[in-house]
Amino acid sequence: MQPTTTPEIDLQPSLLDKALNHFQAWAIENHQNLVSRTFLPIISLVEGIIANNPAYLDAKRQGLGLTFCCAGQIVLGDFKSLETALTSPQARDWRLGTSILSSSHGPGVDKGGRNVFLITLSDADAGGGNHDFFRQCVDDYFFNEGMFIRQHDQVAQRLVNQLATDYVDRINNNALEEFFKNDQRDWKGFLVRYLHYIILGINPDDQETISILTNLHYTKKGTFYYLAGSSILEKLNIWGFSQIPELVEQVATIYENSPVLANFQENDPKYNKMTRRELAKLMVSLMSIAGLQGPLHLGRTAMGYQSLPAYKGRQTSAIDVKSYWDKLDLDNRPSIQLFLLECARLFLPVSASHRVATEPFTVTVAGKTRTFPTGTKILIPMLLGMLNEDFWGATTYEFNAQRENLCPFHMGFNSVGDRHAGRICPGKDLALEMLTDVIITVGKARRAYLSQVVNA
Ligand code: HEM
């Protein structure tokens, strides 16, 4: 295991870090003040984008302590607070971690209807109305027995085998980068076909449909449509973004007509009368923001394409993940899952979620004990839980898939292991099972190719 600490590195916060922390603490406390109302939204937007780099939040915690401000939110970075937040009901706002979501592009509201965007809806036990109904609908129609069966059938296996063939073809042609970048075949092409087949039953060989789905989710970067500021991309037609609203409707129609929704029952009170169109629109947003992004990211880490983050004062980014992949027992599924969880611990695909305070609370921030009002946004930085040295010990920033408690205390899927209060990522099992198959099948093809080259 490589040592990953460089003790002489200065972990002191910069003047800007301190100023931002002090100003935000004051502004959140005095949120009605004109100065707060003018500057807090700008800081929230800009710092919210910057803070998507996991090294940013980690450096803040090292410099400012466990509780600090970032992107207009109070960050409670100690393990216990995170554990409690992830296992308690959550009130929500238009946020995805530190990023602000576009309230006008949310599924449902974009057409003047009700908001069905799951991640923005509060739990019933935290004063919300619809989250639990719509989540139940998503679980019942998509994440069910049929999905499990498809994931273990011959079509799914054929797609994984094709991925391995693409991988070998790319290394053979010295074009491994293309394997991770190309969106028509390879890693992205696989994810579009595989996930739409497993989750919605869509035929992966229907090239016309696959082209439309690829165009929205990857080629035109549809994920950004759901983030604040995307209206500018639309107006300036950056990346052909003016076509996105129409594409979203087109993809929703494909989802509406998908095999898994063939027997959809409209107006069921169990789902608060969710309509087929509402469910389809919700699913477009979920596939764009969660389904096709989380596994893309984790696969890129696990197959060694992207380095682990450059955490300040550590050498985590120098870890060669591929060397761990090459040493795995590829017939031992549990050990492969631990390898994936360790990759996701050091580089979370979704680094944070959030909640909204339902009552005033008092904490010490920026050197002063302060009381923040109801409605304050609180970041849930799972990545800080995953890097907490009090919990994980001196080897926190090192790679060790055998570390104790990795599975039962993993926070990467909006839960603590299997513990949660209704908001665990419903794609967790599906994603880990798929990635395990990929690591095995592509790993075996990689080893066979490399040994053939060595013996040639
Ligand atoms: C490595 C893969 C994945 C990771 C790490 C991951 C992680 C997460 C996290 C952290 C959240 C909570 C976000 C928040 O509430 O702020 C979440 C929510 C969600 N994820 Fe995933 N996800 C992954 C794959 C998937 C897949 C393949 C799907 C399939 C569509 C999916 C569907 C969802 C849905 C529907 C939610 C919203 C749950 C709710 O609010 O009730 N995820 N995911």
Image: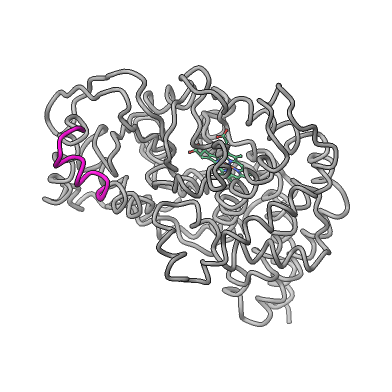
Instruction: State the image quarter where residue 247 is shown.
Output: bottom right
Closer to us: 243 or 20:
243
Residue 35 among magenta residues: yes
- Residue at image location 19% in from the left, 46% down from the top: 38
- Asked if 175 appears above or below 44 in the picture, the reply is below
In the image, residue 447 lies at what x, y percent?
70, 65
Q: Nearer the viewer, residue 147 or 404?
A: 147
Q: Is residue 319 left or right of residue 208?
A: left
Rendered location of residue 147, percent (x, y) = 79, 41
Asked whether 247 falls inside the magenta stretch, the response is: no
Q: 217 left or right of 2?
A: right
Q: Split into 4 quadrants, where in the image is the C terminus? A: bottom right
Residue 197 is situated, as x and y percent measured from the top left of the image, at 78, 52
Ligand 1 shows up in the quarter that is top right
Dividing the picture into quadrants, the one containing residue 18 is top left
What range is drawn magenta here? 31-43
Residue occupying image coordinates x 37% and y 38%: 384
| Rendered location of residue 79, percent (x, y) | 38, 28
In this rendered view, identify the residue nearer to me: 389 or 437.
437
Q: Decide: is 354 above or below 199.
A: above
Most extreme residue toward the front, as rendered? 112
How many numbered discs, if any?
A: 0
The answer to whether 280 is drawn above or below residue 86 in the figure is below
Q: Main secondary structure of the magenta part?
A: helix
